[in-house]
Each structure stands twice: as C-alpha cells, then as structure tokens.
Image (spheres, helix red, strand yellow):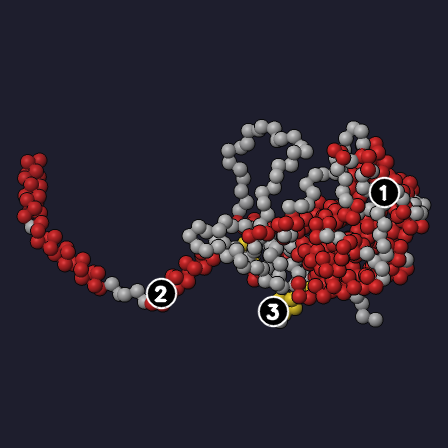
Amino acid sequence: MVEKKSSSSSSTSSNIAKHEGSNNDRAIGQTEVHKSSNPPVSSTTQQQQQRQRKQQAALSNITIAGQERRPSEEHTPLHNLTAKPSVLPLKSPRSRLRYQPQRQQNQSPQPAPFSHFPPTPPTNSPPNMSKLSSALKHLINAPFAKPSYTVVNSHTLTPTITRLATEAKDHGVSPPAWLAFSTATAMTMNSPSAMLLLWSVAQKHAGPTLSPVATAELQREVGLKCISFNGIPRTINCLGAFYNALPADVRSKLSSKPTRQFALDNIEQRKSDGLGLWDSVYFGFERKLLDKLGQSHPDLPVHIIHAHYASLLSNPSRHTYVDGEEKPRETQVGRVLTSLVAIATLRAQTGVGPQVVSHIFGLRKAYERGDAEKEGEVEVPGGKWLSSEEGNKWLLEWIDELVKGIGTMQEGEAQQEQTSGGTTFAPGLERAKL
C-alpha cells in the first residue's frame, strides 16, 4: 500500500510539472479577467474617503471636550482657530458644544512639581488597577446628574456684567467689591466661563485699579475662599478651568508660592486670627453659637474655627507669612470682601437663608465695630454703602441677576434655562408673581 501510494504521488507531481506552463498562462489570463471585471471606484466614494481623511486630520488638532490633543505632524495644525464667541472652550456635557478649537498659546503648560510636601513614599502598586465599565461611566456622566460646568453665552452675559460694572461705579462701589461677589456667584454656579467673562469685562471698567494679573489673582483668592461655603470639588474644577483659559502671558505672572502654611512659630497666631474673625462676624452671639454648634457635634466648632476661619477665611498676619511671601494688597480678600463672598455664595446656592442673614449682619458689623479699618485691612470703596439697607438690597438683587444670567443659555434661536435659574445646589431662584 505504501509503494502504490508513493508511485501515485510521483505521477501526480510529474503531471503538475508537465502542465505547469499552461496552468500559469491560464492563471495569468484569469487574473486579467478578474481585474477587468472589478467595477471602477466612483468619484462619490473617493470624495467621501477624502472628506473622512480631512475630518480625522482636523480633529487631531483641536481640543475635544476640554482634553488637549497633540497637533498631527502630517497635517497643518489648526492653531489659528478660535473658539466660538458664544461659548467659551470649556468642557460641557452638551454634545453640540463638545468640539471647540483652542489657541495654542492658551494651552496649559505642564505644572511644576509642588515642593511644599514631601515626595510620595515608594510602594508596591498592584499590577492590575481596576477600571470602570462603560456602563458605569455613562451612569456617572448622565446628563441629569449635571457632571460638568455651567457653560454661559458671552453675548447675553457680557451686557449684564457691563451693566453691573456701570451701576457699581454710579454707587461708588469699587471694582474689587463687585468683582468679588460676582466671582463668588460664578463659582457657586460652577461656571469658570462666567469667571473668564468677569475677568475680561473688568479690564475695561477697572481702570488702573486692577491689572489683568491682579484681577486674576483676586478672582483666584475669592475662588479659594469659596471652599468654606461651596466645598472643595467646585473650587478645584473652576479654578483649574479658569487658569487654563487665561492668556499665557497672564498665567506666567501668577503667584506660584503658597502663603497659608502652618508652622510652629505661627500656628497660635493663625488660630487667634481665625477666632478673631469669627468674633467679628458673629459679634454678640459668638460664644453662644459655638456652644450650639458643639451640641450638634463636638468637633464641628473646632473644625469651623481651625480649618476655615483660621486657615482660609482670615488672612495671615504680616509677620506670620512663611518665607516672607505676602500677596499684593490689591489682590487680598480682607474682612469686607470675605463677607461679600459669603453672602454671594450662600444666596446663589439657595436653601440656606439663616446663613445669608448671619453674613448680612457680618458685613454690617465690619463697619459698626470698625474692623474694616483695622491695621492691615485694605480699604474697599463703596463697602460701607453695601453694608447699608439700600446696599444690601442692591447686592442681593445683583446676585440674583447673575444667577439668572449664568443659568440661562442661548443656543441658536432656542433659549434654554438650566435648573430654573442655573444653580445645581438647589432647584433655583423662582420669584413669585405679585
């Protein structure tokens, strides 16, 4: 059987070799037939392919939903494109606002290492880090959960801010004052794009009072103090987006040194400064209120005084700054501006009326007790008028106006209102018809 099989195989090989030339000729002929039988590529298909290639090349050079992409080396970068004037290039959950070109000079540089904390100790990280499923990511970023910023329309909000600056000037209210409470309102509304509009309008109405860098520094300081009223996450996100949206020449001149570190030689003074600010705001009820807070939780008054009034809301005394670093006086958020920040954030977030009342009185006490004129405090022109009955009403009405302006967004011809006035803390401000 093996021999027969072997001879059969030899016979087959010889037959293949014998007809090799004719088979090759036949194969070549068939190949030519197949080539000629393929239908020609239509011009429409070629145009679609070219269009797809162009779109892919363009998308590789623009900012997608706030995430930076490197310019493609094979195509001309679209660095000269600017964002649409009606929507600033900030991350938005709305799909129609997702693709926004951005200038190259506004791209944020890599942050320098923060050397004020010790390096992370070496650890053995697990080989496989856990990942979120697509379904969980979609649930986290569901539109009803409002996972991103409040994006504003510059065409409608800019006239509102300009009118605010004009009215403030008529009442003698200085740019730092109206910029402080309007920035605090924008922070509460989770809108860094509104903060950038405030910065832009302030350049035209602040005059020599505030330079572009000083304006940004003041807004950053306001945003920092908003932690005590709005929480840490909102300040992290808004200040980060605001910084990235500023022009590169302004960013490069912003302060990079912290001024609120605790040290052995300043901690007692810082605690005293915090308690002093508390006593100033709640004068007449200061100790009684601390006792009441202690009933709710024994650590509540301790945390409020030490972690907020001492380390954040009060400004370090001049001799308690570490490394001799001190913020310029025009960018300091002192006693009066801190009360304006408190009133704006609490009013904008809604649902905390008792705290709004407390800080309205706190603003008045700053002038009744003379704390606004103490040594080290920066004079706030118009602050005394804002502490009056008429000034209180003007202040609250303008906070409400900004909440409405930031929360209302224009898209084409359709006007949509976000959360009935825009605040994501509570349902929003809805005035009853009288």
First-in-chain label (1 vs 2): 2
Residue 292 location (% of width, % of height) = 88, 42
Task: Judge from the rendering whether residue 88 lies leftward or rightward of residue 51; answer left or right.
Answer: right
Spatial separation of the CA atoms under disc 3 and disc 2: 33 Å
Where residue 320 sits, quadrant-wise, is: top right
Which of the two marks, 1 or 2, is nearer to us in this view? 1
Q: Secondary structure at mark 1?
A: loop
Label 2 sits on residue: 45
Q: Are marks 3 and 2 in contact (CB under 8 Å)?
A: no
**Residue located 80% across and 29% down the image:** 265
First-in-chain label (3 vs 2): 2
Query: Residue flagged by tag 2: what amino acid is it?
Result: Thr
Q: Are marks 3 and 1 in contact (CB under 8 Å)?
A: no
Spatial separation of the CA atoms under disc 1 and disc 2: 73 Å
Residue 204 location (% of width, % of height) = 72, 60
Residue 404 location (% of width, % of height) = 73, 63
Instruction: For residue 295, say whether it is visible.
Output: no
Q: Report the front residue among 432 and 26.
A: 26
Mark 3, Cα crowd under 10 Å, few <14 / some 14-19 / many 20+, is: few
Q: Report the front residue among 359 and 130.
A: 359
Label 1 sits on residue: 376
Vertical placement of residue 433 versus 266, above or below: below
Q: Secondary structure at mark 2?
A: helix
Position of the C terminus by quadrant: bottom right
Query: Residue flagged by tag 1: what amino acid is it?
Result: Gly
Label 3 sits on residue: 412
Task: Judge from the rendering whether residue 374 lies leftward or rightward of residue 303; answer left or right.
Answer: right
First-in-chain label (3 vs 1): 1
Which of the two marks, 3 or 1, is nearer to us in this view? 1
Spatial separation of the CA atoms under disc 3 and disc 1: 50 Å
Query: Residue flagged by tag 3: what amino acid is it?
Result: Gly
**Residue located 35% across and 65% down the image:** 45
